[in-house]
Image: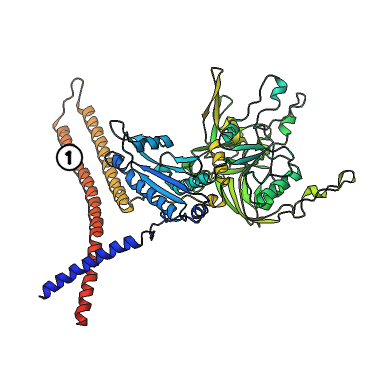
Amino acid sequence: MKKLLSLGGLALVLVLFLVVNVLFNALFTSTRFDLTENKLYTLSSGAKNVVSKLNDPVKLKFYFSRKLLAESDAAPLIGYGDRVRELLEEFVASSNGKLTLEVFDPEPFSEEEDRAVGFGLSGAPVTAGGEKAYFGLAATGTTDMEEVIPFFDQRKEESLEYDITRLVYNISNPKKKVVGLITKLPLEGDPMARMRNPRAAPEEWAILEQIRAQFDVRTLADGVTAIDKDVDVLLVVHPQQLVPETLYAIDQYVLGGGKAVVFADPHCEVQQVQRDPNNPLQDMMADRSSSLGALFDAWGIEMKADEIAGDRDNALRVNYGGQGVEYLVWLGFNKDKGALSTTDFTTNQLGLVRMATAGILSKKDGGTTSITPLIETSKASQRIQKSQIQFGPNPPGLLQSFKSGDEKLMLAARVSGPAKTAFPDGSPKAKEPPVDGATKPEEPATIQESKEINVIVVADADLLSNNFWADIKDFLGIQKIMIKTADNCDFLLNALDNLSGSNDLISLRSRGKYQRPFDKVVQIRKDAEVKFRQREKELEDKLRDTETKISELQRGKEGEGAIVLNEEQIAELEKFREEQVKTRQDLRRVKHDLLQDVESLGRTVTLANLAIMPLLILGFALAFLLRKKQSS
């Protein structure tokens, strides 16, 4: 009887457990616990702010070919697909009802596949018959505007939250962003070209063409005294000797919440200089530097006018005197070498950025802003005096005099945080005397400080030139074809895209990966591989030693004619063969031990996963029965 009661008690506990589990799922569907190390399923505050402030509803349509992927070699994508769907559900849960999510599993040749193609999603062939799997996101708003992520690339997983947030933000802010351009370089074309040839049309730089494709570019005249509030981001290129009124306008724009990308340069090689045939030194002595001076001081960042960054590890190879030589001040930064920030969205997906005679940025003493490096040299770098390159390139001379400073030099940075005005006494224009005694219009009050500025500063303007990132070819005289050779343009577009959004969007940073290596398994494999390679090397060494010994014996005993092995050589060969067989057996044993260790660990983890919950239930049941028995 007691046995029946005990079994009945266990059954009752199991039923109660199932009922509680069903009720919990029904009543607390929105309750989530994120126990991942990097909080992969928890939205950052910036993403939450963006989706919670949506004015109009946004529909998300997630296309994920689960069935097709499960039957193909791309089945591992299913885990990442679930991760994306669950993150999308977090966005919906944080949107105060403004976001809705629809999930589709499009089958080949279905209407759902047609709709996915209509949105512009990319299908990947995953079967021998060419059937395509879809793994993308389309978003629609109250207008006809659509935004898509054509295919979720797992290699870009760190930017997953940012990409989705930006898509939602762009749908809710459909107007084309305005870029205000202040430049002392001929980005819009060489103004002297028409003077040399009246029929010639000045060709604008390729990088400006790319910007126009995504933004509404508004060129601001030299000497501009005010920047309109509808300018979403200000692009300042080679700000050489800007008048105080323009500096004041930039200062007030940034303190008033405007975003800016600044390309300053201590020695701009692409700057056009008026040449004097009678004075060749005029070109060499010309001032090619640019800076924002007092504004940089107010923003807490510094760029010395007489220092150029040299980098032994990232130097580009150039042709000098008919020979290839590394030019320490022409640099190519590859993401594999750690020069490009992997946590900032302006640089984390770039492959190569080229720069020339770049300056060096540093945080100014007493600065209140936060300076985050975007591009840095390696530690095999040197601060090179501008005078060493001002009178012409000398790559061999720089190499000979190179001495590493054993420090990373910052060439591009994000500046954020609180800052004060560089013009505490007000507008320079307000100090000018009135013309002809006329009454001067009253100037707006000067913004004295800001709690949060957002600026990206780059200590090189040459990188925008076609020569350093694009190969422009003329095709049959009909059109020009651009072949990208570096990611300089992508760097600028990323910066403009990032800064033209809200401060919440700018605040997002790269997140961790969903898939993490099984550290224990990796270590087991590494240990076994070390044993395998060591044993393999021993076998190869023994083989070489034996062959050498046989050759020596053969030369001492043999004359001309066919090779005849004596008894000593035959015995030596037999000994080698036995050793070879034994070593091969050892190698197979190492491989077997490797698989055995990994499989054993896998069985242990599986058993733990299967046993923990039943053991917990059993523990609760036993505790329940003991308590009941004691109370009776």
Secondary structure beneath disc 1? helix
Q: Quadrant of the C terminus?
A: bottom left
Instruction: Give the amino acid at mark 1.
Output: Val
- Could you say which is closer to the camera, residue 516 or residue 530? 516
User: In the rendered image, which quarter is residue 274 located in?
Assistant: top right
Left or right of 247 on screen, residue 324: left
Residue 197 image position (x, y, % from top left): 70, 19
- Could you say which is closer to the camera, residue 56 or residue 328? 56
Callout 1: 10 Å neighbours few (<14), some, many (20+)? Answer: few
- Could you say which is closer to the camera, residue 281 or residue 289? 289
Q: Is residue 262 visible?
A: no
Disc 1 target residue: 581
Residue 81 image position (x, y, % from top left): 36, 46
**Residue at position x 30%, y 46% from top?**
530
Left or right of 312 on screen, residue 186: right
Looking at the image, residue 373 lies above or below residue 547: below
